[in-house]
Image (spheres, rainbow, N blue to C red):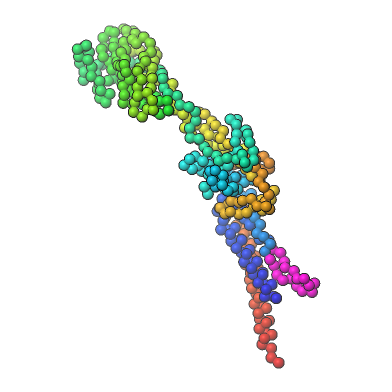
Amino acid sequence: MSFYTSLSGLKGAQTELGTVSNNIANVGSYGFKKSRTEFGDIISSSRTTPGNGTRLKSIEQQFSQGGFEATSRELDLAIAGSGFFVTRDDLTGGNTAFTRNGKFSTDAASFLIDSNGGYVQGLPVDPEGNVTAGGLSAATNIQIPQTSGVPNATSLIDLTVSLPANADVPANRPAYTAANPYTFDRLDPNSYNHSTQTTVYDSSGNSIPATIYYVRTSDGTPSNWQARMFVGSEEATPGPVNLRFDAAGNRTLPAGTVTFDPVYPAGASAPLDLTLDLGATNQAAGPFTQRSLEQDGFAAGSLSDVTIGEDGLVTATFSNGETKAIAKLAMANFANPEGLKQLGDARWSVTGESGQAVIAAPGEEGIGSIQSGALERANVDITEELVALISAQRNFQANAKAIETGNQMTQSIMNLRS
């Protein structure tokens, strides 16, 4: 019987060696939780017979807090305290898993996913970030919107420039007469004096360059200029706009705003109806000066940043200055986390021993807070594991020695001679 007793000890030591080795091997795995072997003795039914060895009762997971590793990514998250992130392996539901590995990213459809491709779950919130529905059934995939707001097509361009009083009529053209008009070519800088550029937007938010060219047509009194506006490669009509200035440099023409016919440049989703307001445009001594240039159109805001607070609130910030509360991270807690089933890659699933998941936002129901820009390292202490490794090795050697001793005793008995 001593052979079998020592054999059970060998198997137990081998299991412990495997468990400790697995802990050491995963020291670099984010969110990993170490395990510990639990053994029990095998007793005999007789009070005069020694025990029959040892047996493995369980391999218990240790859900103590791991250390934090700071990163520079907003989507790297660590849980300070108890709790698990909730993920699903399919957009329409699928299997639910729980993890402490907060190395998240977004996929091609802007869904928040974990390092295994599982969809991170969130609880719905109102515009102020307050949770509006709880429980696992209310949790949904978190999708980060790439745009925000409704685009507005440009309708008005406000422009004020100061044109130089000493500007020459472009050298490549003769003095203006009705019989000898100017020839303008926007690709020829010798055919105009100055230009200004802005960006206008169509009804879909597409951006299109708009350029206004200024051409002096006469340098007498009154002084005459022309302004030609191109949207993309299309010239706005009717045009050109004739500008006239008196001896003091005050604009006398046009007297009000200029409304163009609808212009439909390449790349636009619809024609643009534009009005030009020249404001306080004048002619004065000195260089050409653009004093102001504004337009009233805008595109929808594009995503510029995503932040996740300690309370798990996912907030998106857009280029138009708008911020939007997307969701709060759905977190899970268990009455007995040690009863969870390991799925690998620092993921677990519910069992009868763990109890059902209690779903809440971070900071509620005993769940810890979220630290953004950090990841939780494995809770493995290398020094402790190396000591355990030596201990398991010694146990293995001792049981092997016991088998060897039993074998020698048996051999001695077989060698007895009468």
Return the residue found at the far bottom: 418
Left or right placement of residue 386 versus residue 72 in this view: right
User: Quadrant where the C terminus lies?
Assistant: bottom right
Q: In this view, does 128 lie above or below 365?
A: above
Q: Which residue is drawn at 35% across and 18% down?
A: 261
Say if residue 342 shows up in the picture: yes
Q: Is residue 93 above or below residue 317?
A: below
Looking at the picture, tell me which residue is in the foreground, 63 or 111: 111
Task: Give residue 21's position: percent from left, percent from top.
Answer: 59, 61
* Rendering quarter of residue 388: bottom right
Task: Give residue 302's position: percent from left, percent from top.
Answer: 47, 32
* Rendering quarter of residue 83: top right
Please check the rendered image and state whether residue 394 is part of the magenta-colored stretch, yes or no: no
Task: Give residue 365's position: percent from left, percent from top.
Answer: 68, 41
User: Quadrant where the N terminus lies?
Assistant: bottom right
Say if residue 313 shows up in the picture: no
Q: Is residue 317 above or below residue 330?
A: above
Span shown in magenta: 39-55
Please check the rendered image and state whether residue 42 is part of the magenta-colored stretch, yes or no: yes
Q: Residue at x 25, y 23 (%)?
A: 185
Left or right placement of residue 27 versus residue 301 in this view: right
Tag count: 0
Q: Residue at x 56, y 56 (%)?
A: 26
Left or right placement of residue 340 versus residue 203 in this view: right
Looking at the picture, tell me which residue is in the foreground, 369 or 4: 4
Q: In this view, does 177 lie above or below 235?
A: above
Q: Residue at x 62, y 59 (%)?
A: 385
Query: Chief secondary structure of the magenta span?
Result: loop
Left or right placement of residue 18 versus residue 275 in this view: right
Task: Give residue 372's position: percent from left, percent from top.
Answer: 57, 41
